Image (spheres, helix red, strand yellow):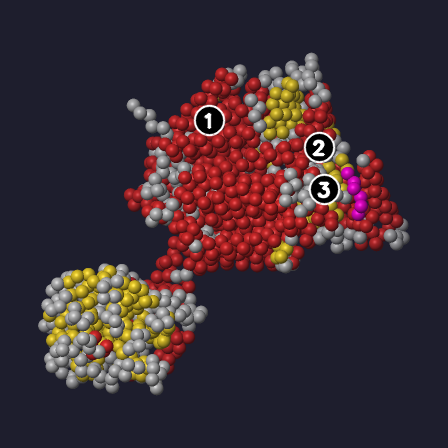
Amino acid sequence: MRSRVWFGRVLPALFGITLLAFGVARADGIDDPLRAPTLNAFKGKTVAFLPLSMGFDLTEGWGAMMKHQADELGYKFEIRDPNWNTDAGAQALTQLISEKPDIIVVHNPDVQSYARLLKKAEAAGIAIIQVNMKSATPTQYYVGADWIGLGERAANEVVKACAPGKGPSTKIAIVQGALTAAASIYQIKGVDNVLSKHPEIKVVSNQAADWDASKARAVTQTVLQQNPDLCGIIGFWDGQDTGTGAAIREAGKTGKVFLITSGGGAKSACENLENGTFSADTSYDVPGQGRDINSAIRAILEDKAATKDLRVVLYTPLRVLTKADVKPGACWTPQSLFE
Amino acid sequence: MKIALTQERIVFALAVLLFAGFAIVLPNFLTAGNVLTLIRGVSVLGILGLGMAVVVIGRGIDLSIVANMAISVAWTLDMADRGVPLGVALSLGFGFVVLMGLITGFLVAYVEIPPLFATLAMGAFIYGFGRAALLSQDVIQMPAHAGILNLAGTGHVLGVPMPIILLAVASLLAFLFLRYTRPGRTIYGFGDNLQAARITGLSVRPMQVAQYVISGIVAFAAGIITATAVESMNTRIVNGTLIYDVILVVVLGGVGLSGGKGGVRNVLVGTLLIGVLLNGMTIMDVQYTVQNVVKSLILLVAIVVDSLVNPRDEQTAQQGDI
Amino acid sequence: MVETSAPTGADDAAAEAAAARPRFSDTLVRLRYTLIPDHVVGEILTKRWVDNAAPALFLVLVIATFGTLLPDFFSIGSLTSSLRQLGEFGCVVLAMMIVLVAGGIDLSVGSVFALGNFTALLLMNVLNTPAWVALVAVLAVCGLVGLVNGVLIGFLRLRAFLTTLVTLIIVRALVDMLLLRYATAITAGSPDSSVWDFVGDGSIGPVPFSIVVLLVLVIGGHVLLSRSRPGWRVMAVGGSRRSAHNAGISVRRTVCGTYVISGLLVGLSGFMYAARLSSAGAETGVGLELQALTAAILGGNSLGGGRGSTGKALMGAITVLVITNGVVRLGMQSGAGSMILGIILILAITVDVRWLKNRYKVLNKVYVSPAYNRLPPAPETAAGSGSPYAVNDKLRDVEIIGLGVVEGPEDVIFDRRDDLYCGTRHGDLVRFLAPDYTRHEVFAHIGGHPLGMQFDRDENLVVCVGGMGLYKVAPDGEVSKMTDETNRTPFKINDDARLRLTDDCDIAPDGRVFFSEGTMRYEMHSWPVDALESRGNGRFCVYDPRTNTTRTIIRDVLFANGVCLASDKQSFMYAETWGCRVRRYHFDGPKKGRIEDVLPNLPGYADNINRASDGNYWLALVGMRSPPVDLALQMPGFRRRMARRIAPDEWLYPNINTGCVVKFDESGRILDALWDLGGKNHPMITSMREHKGYLYLGGISNNRIGRYRIPGADPTWNGYDAYWGARA
């Protein structure tokens, strides 16, 4: 696995250097024989992006970065937005397969839904880059968070904060996303991995809030009522956990209950860290993911044959942000993506 | 005296039973704090239920209520985020729900589209229009300078959370409106028998339009409470099951979908049952899919008992009454 | 019937002048109203299938729009991939449609779809059963959910909306719980079944398997729904639950059945979806109920029941899929699809609602479509003019039979025992007993209004029944149908196979019955409106009892009326009411197939024709012509405006209040005319029958039968013996 990551990282980097070299070569006024073929490799190519839905920080961030690169290198970039509807997404993917773009960047809703279609797409000669959610079908590239690792990381932080004697108690609560969502299932797996080794930590509530802040708020409020000495809460998505944080604040326990959540690391995450809504936020670094996706796209378009049999997994380096880490540049905004 | 077994009484009895049961079984259930949390948890649902009830009593249904709530408030927040003065943003958001209510009402009253479809279509339209034309994000964050508006979701009066106070105020207003005002009685009139009401000379159509405007305004208010409580508005709730929950609290308490029956009390009874259930089951750490099943089964029991106690007759059943 | 003002002399003169020489503009008018088939519009509007016009138009518009916007919309690959999805979605819409038609709604389809999908994958991927076992299991499971819905809604009579809402939530929760447990196992397994692969991936010819399934269901479902007993029950329950209940249909079982069918169809759809995608995602089928409902309604199936078809469901399904997929492919912003769908749904329902509400108003306005009808100037009827038609008062003192007993004796006839028969508008045949005709009895009850009558050789009474057809009444009063349909004219929009207004008949010696049908465009009660049209909607048919077949022999008759066989028994005289003439048609012999004018220009509207004792013929004129009406008949545009702009009881109708009886011979000479000028005893005459020296008179809106003594007539002559020969 390590070597693959290394390989996947270095390859795009090499391209970057090559491109840089062209830039230098041009400055000297010498016509580089490699330049035209390289740039021509992008002409007339098509990259399609199939997110879960546009309109939230992750997909908007990736989309903006992919579009930026496409405009620079002159290939065609299309977004097919199924708006959270898995059936529409499956249909859009089916449709894309019949249209045969060069690359499809897929944001899977879960491990299952697109598995068979992705196999078909690869059989049809389309390169597939999966983003942030691995399908049961491995494809050329996977770029995204390691969800089990994310869960482990969050659990470790809570175990640290709520170790016997450190917090008011060893009671913690878990606020999942949608029960059946893969991101949720994998995170809970990671959390379980850690907690099974720490029997002293007591989970008093393990509820799903359906990615909905209001529901998270209601659940947290009830849990805090029942367990005024609650020590920590593991939340699964920062968008949803603004509600969890609001319930903590309303109970007057800001700073007393350790709330760790995760997300794409957009500006709102930093704001919530700063005002104490979140104690910690694990960021999977959308700008970094965007760069990785772009490198993968370049590598494939450059030489489809060479990358054909690759199976590259690029796990995003996770970053745990706390209030101390909040400084300009720690979180991204749509404007900061290209700086 | 014989007490007739209506759906409302059945549900109320169920709620009381459950409440008593939880109070005995769960140690911290019967504390002031938990009871407030319990009601606080369903106050927005109750407020939306009141808006829905006004429409349902007038033999309609408003499936666009959640879309109205999400989009109008999200748009308001988005404008405030971008520097529009809060007052202006709020007025525009309010204007939006009124306009949408007018359109829906027009479609139902004058074009004579069945309410189920008019509001289904309007719900799709409002959400789509909002997402495509007004908002660029799914989740709109609350601006930092919202000031007193925040009180709607997070304030307290004498230790009682603001949403509960607002639910009480809304209930009182709805009660007075439905019971003592001319438009309120008109709604019962045409909800019971549209043709008769029209022949009697009641101004049915304008009141039908007004119903949807009212439910839109209620949605806006509920949205403000929701948004200020969690400092954001997530437009994805439109695709969720909230709308079914709203219908649930309305019909659970015995507001008949065929119109003309029920009132504020019924909505509150339904809301109470749901509140007790959700709170108790969350304390017991029951998974929410199981909570859904329990919730639905209780509704099913309520309507089955109601149907057995007050059977519908083939001779008097209304055509197209689903 | 209502004439606005008495025509002045100047108008008369103008009318006559206009009638005398046809102008060029008249020719243009005639051509305009002959060549352009205005009547087709009204006839199309009466068809139930025009309901599909608006949905079909939407479908075409949507396809055209997206076809233009998306360059490869019509490419084979693109179509095939959309079609597979259509097969699955179409089944769900069919399920929704069948429930809607019976007056219910099924919100649980989305969850049941997910349950079907899950069950199929569990059986195939984890338990590795054969595909057919999986299919049966899926159908059983989903049918069971449908049965639960059906029992709750049908038998316990819960509200469909709430009940299926509850099953929607419960089944969804169930699927979620099952998925948590089995999702990993499902992902790991891969079934090895060629049948399974064929269901998901295979095609029959170029057509994907799921589409074949859908087409079979659409066609089979249409036949079932529109042409089978169970289908009619479903339609009846949806159309009017109460009437269906009172008619003895088991409403509860029928309603329950629709939910079971819905469950089965959705299960089948889930099975095909599972085979195609093998995806056990938690989001499967979320929101499908609203999509299916939208599709069903867009196609024109109405909420509340009674109106719907599989074709409508298919149109709706295609429209919705094209829109949702098209919007995603256009790469439009999130929400654009939802917005467009919302707008289209509002537009479609608006059109549908307004259409249903106004269809009959429009139909009433455009159905009457007048044509050009130019009559020669009417013969003189003034007293003392020397005209054979000159008015007199011979009928003033007719005797009255059955006053107040009969209503609407259009025709009268005698049997060999001198008993008198007539029909009434209550649908009875009444018999007045000889000799004094004061006693009467109901001879037979037919149900429709009996019009023209004739005895056949075996003394069966052959009766033309308005709205029903040709019937036979045996001497013991037993009624049996002879025919109620004839051969259908190809490409005619109104179904002219059915007989609407059989009017009069006569019987050839070989037993063939020649009968007239007044008009094919109007029902019995609105027959005078046909005069406004004067289009030639009548026809003559022949029924042959030897082969039990009916054929149309003369078409385009301006209200076909009286029929009477001529003396040669190879031709018959017939009356053409709005054409004001009597003609003769040769059905056998040397002139076979020829038509000759006998009385080409009558002063009134010809009705029944019967034989007289002296070998000549009696002819009833139901009403007399008047110059304004004659002029109006040459002005179809005027009559059209009239029909559209003013209420039907204000229209200008021909006079059918006052008429007369004339006697003519085969050469077309008028021998006698009998009038009741004062209108005292018997002004309206639609039929007359000579019997033993008397003439008996019938009228379709009279409450009596008249009896006139014919001076010098043979007092022993009776029609039966004279025609069929005397018997012992």
* C-alpha gap between disc 1 and disc 2: 38 Å
Which residue position is annotated with label 1?
B273
Tell me which amino acid carries mark 2.
Answer: Trp
User: Is residue A311 highlighted in magenta?
Assistant: yes
Tell me which amino acid carries mark 1.
Answer: Leu
Q: Magenta stretch?
A: A308-313
Can residue B233 be seen in the rendering of this structure? yes
Q: Vertical placement of C698 versus C330: above or below? A: below
Chain under label 3? A
* C-alpha gap between disc 1 and disc 3: 46 Å
Which residue position is annotated with label 3?
A137
Q: Secondary structure at mark 3?
A: loop
User: Is residue A197 highlighted in magenta?
Assistant: no
Q: Is most of the magenta stretch helix, strand or loop?
A: loop
Question: Which image quadrant: the N terminus of chain C?
Answer: bottom left
Query: How would you rate the neighbour count of disc 2 (Cα within 10 Å): few for under 14, some for 14-19, many for 20 or more?
Result: many
Chain under label 2? A
Between C302 and A246, the one lying in front of the other is: C302
Residue B81 position in % (x across, y down): 60, 35
* Residue ranking furthest to the front: C728
Q: Are marks 1 and 2 on the same chain?
A: no
Tag 2 and tag 3, C-beta contact below 8 Å? no
